[in-house]
Image (tube, rainbow, N blue to C red):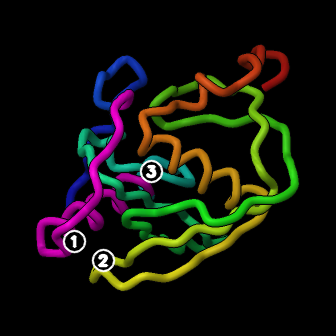
Amino acid sequence: MGLRKILTDKEPALHKVCKPVTAFDAKLHKLLDDMAETLLDSGGVGLAAPQVGILRRVVLVDVGGEEPEILELINPELLETSGEQYGPEGCLSVPGKYGLVKRPNYAKVRAQDRDGNWFEAEGEELIARCFCHELDHLDGIIYTQVMDRFLTEDEM
């Protein structure tokens, strides 16, 4: 395993649509393992492959509470959303800044695991926000494009 460099919002890769994963092989497993190590090291809640320069539809979300529990989502699709939440959101690719973003309060996704098996996952509040935020990355969208405004230093 190894840490990967997290790209910032100025990098062109973060603004491109990612391609589906078609090979569920050792190369993918290495990417997933590296991304997990990078996510845990960063202290973030989610990480998408384009954030480490790989234009594939791969997302990791830490769904754990006190202990990390990394959920791997390959070729994820948003199946269902409901409710609404409005609040601060940040991104590892936009360090030190937070913006006000409206997201669903509940989200359900369908994705493949590292072996290509399909499954569904759902979450509320932070997990729903994270699912939506990370899936946006796969379509070249950064939260700064959908936020209302940045928070001031006093608000943070």
Q: Earlier in the sequence, mark 3 or mark 2?
A: 3
The x, y position of residue 91, in whole percent, is 55, 36
Q: What's the magenta region?
A: 14-39
Say the numbered circle drawn on residue 47: 3
- In depth, the one of 81 and 72 nearer the eye is 81
Q: Residue at x 38, y 27 (%)?
A: 15
| Quarter of the figure with the C terminus | top right
Q: Are marks 1 and 3 in contact (CB under 8 Å)?
A: no
Q: Earlier in the sequence, mark 1 or mark 2?
A: 1
Judge left or right: residue 132 versus residue 47.
Answer: right
Q: Is residue 31 within the magenta segment?
A: yes
Q: Nearer the viewer, mark 1 or mark 2?
A: 2
- In depth, the one of 128 and 95 nearer the eye is 128
Rate crowding at label 3 as few (under 14), some (14 to 19) or many (20 or more) other CA atoms within 10 Å.
Answer: many
State how many labels appear. Answer: 3
Write down the residue under mark 2: 114
Magenta portion: prevailing SS class:
helix
Residue extending furthest toward the front: 79
Write down the residue under mark 1: 29
Under mark 2, the amino acid is Arg
